Image: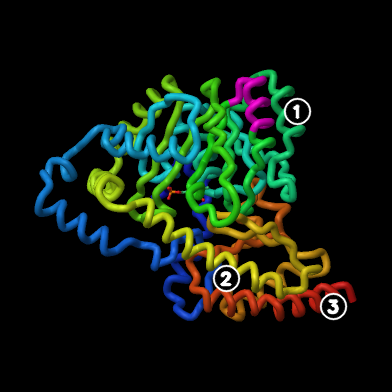
Amino acid sequence: MHYQFANRINQLQGSPLRENAKRNMEAKDVISFAYGYPSIDAFPMETLKTISERMYTEFDPESFLQYGASEGLPELRELVKQRIAKQSAIASDDDLMIVSGSTQAMDLVIKVLCNEGDVVLCEEQTFSGAVNAIKGYGAKAVPVPMNVDEECIDTKVLEELLAKDTEHRIKLLYLIPTFQNPLGTSIPLEKRQEIYAIAKKYGLLIFEDDPYGDLLYFGDAIPKMKSFDTDDLIIYAGSFSKILAPSTRLGFVMAPPAIFEKLVLAKQVSDSHTNFYWQVLLTEFMKNYDFEQHVSYLKELYREKLTVMLEELAKLPQDAIHYIEPTGGYFICCELAEDVDEEAFLDYLFDHKVIVIPGNIMSVAGKGYEKFFRLNFTKPTIEDIRLGIQQMQDAISFARVEQVSKAI
Ligand SMILES: Cc1ncc(COP(=O)(O)O)c(C=O)c1O
């Protein structure tokens, strides 16, 4: 049988990350810096077990086994709103919906805003799930050049693109302003304000994707872009994947009222509502247990891992590798020097059972980032971080020789 699939699905590529994940799960002796996974020490097993047992013995089963509202559990929505407001003043009084991971927030937003052929601007290297959501509705993901050392997109190019867009094809700017995936960078406050001012001038909507915002290890938090959204231009999304457990699929989206209404409609069609078992469990965790203490524990755990990774990276020849030291999140992104052959470097690591993510996988254009690779520091153990980064010493020497021998 020859099946005729819709264009929207033919345009999508399976996530190379997930395909690799399946293979690497089976290989036990691999040191993987590849995936954006939490550490297994990060799951609050005792609290989850206690609440779960209480739910089955003390709670009304209707509260977590029945169908429920598409917007999510009112108490949880309120708790999440209060938590965001505590972290960073929020200028608007937008409503908040619980969604099935922030991946769904992006999917719903594109579904609601974009027709085929519309444009969503993105950072040049970004979360591949967002790019797939854009392509899945026949819209175009267009990269805005990044100035990695300034930790920001090129705002001049952004403004030029908007000024030229007389037909208003640009529907959205997708940004990960805090602890970016894959770059680990955070847009400085002045640049956030500058981007917001440009958005205001051109009536541009911004999707602020913030799944890592809680995980600040060094320095001060930078206010969320949503905190200066006086003009209803920002859709803000967050997630409990990185601070509770990804399998809960608990995320949230906050949007100006007119957009919110459409998002609820789209959510109804998509999956009716997010899993109430986890919504009730998280509500209980946030209300009657110390959720913030759990997040503080995660910050300690990951701060140590980041510190060790940076210590080990500092021992590598610094003329061979360039990276920005992140102050939070899950990732460090490295760039190899011109004289280090990237293929030889990655092959050497792979042959020595160390896995990283090559830059082009995260590149919206699928090219141009050959010299980059992403390292995750939350999932591997401290010992593996040391051993894995130490392998890069020899990988660099090997790749430098390869580069020279190619030229002979
Ligand atoms: C920037 C970004 N947004 C969203 C997600 C997905 O989060 P969720 O598990 O809530 O769907 C990820 C996950 O890796 C991410 O890096």
Nearest to N terminus: mark 3 or mark 2: 2
Residue at 38% x, 23% y is: 261
| Residue nearest the viewer, comparing 173 with 238 | 238
Q: Could you tell whether 40 is left or right of 205 in the image?
A: left
Q: Quadrant of residue 111?
A: top left
Q: Which residue is mark 1?
A: 160
SS of the residue at dot 2?
A: strand
Residue furthest toward the right? Answer: 408
Asked whether disc 3 touches disc 2, contact meaning CB atoms under 8 Å apart, the reply is no
Pointer 2: residues within 10 angstroms few (<14), some, or many (20+)? many
Q: Residue 195 lies in magenta, yes or no?
A: yes
Residue at 51% x, 55% y is: 15
Tell me the chief SS of the magenta region: helix
Q: Which residue is mark 2?
A: 355
Image depth: mark 1 or mark 3 in front = 1
Percent across and percent down for residue 87 are 47, 41
Nearest to N terminus: mark 2 or mark 1: 1
Percent across and percent down for residue 42 are 39, 63
Quadrant including the C terminus? bottom right
* Magenta extent: 193-204
Nearest to N terminus: mark 1 or mark 3: 1
Q: Could you tell whether 90 is left or right of 408 in the image?
A: left
Q: Is mark 2 within 8 Å of ligand 1?
A: no
Q: Quadrant of residue 242?
A: bottom left
Three-letter amino acid code of the residue under disc 2: Ile
Mark number displayed over residue 350: none
Image depth: mark 3 or mark 2 in front = 2
CA distance for labels 2 and 1? 39 Å
Three-letter amino acid code of the residue under disc 3: Ser
CA distance for labels 1 and 3? 43 Å
Q: Which residue is mark 3?
A: 405
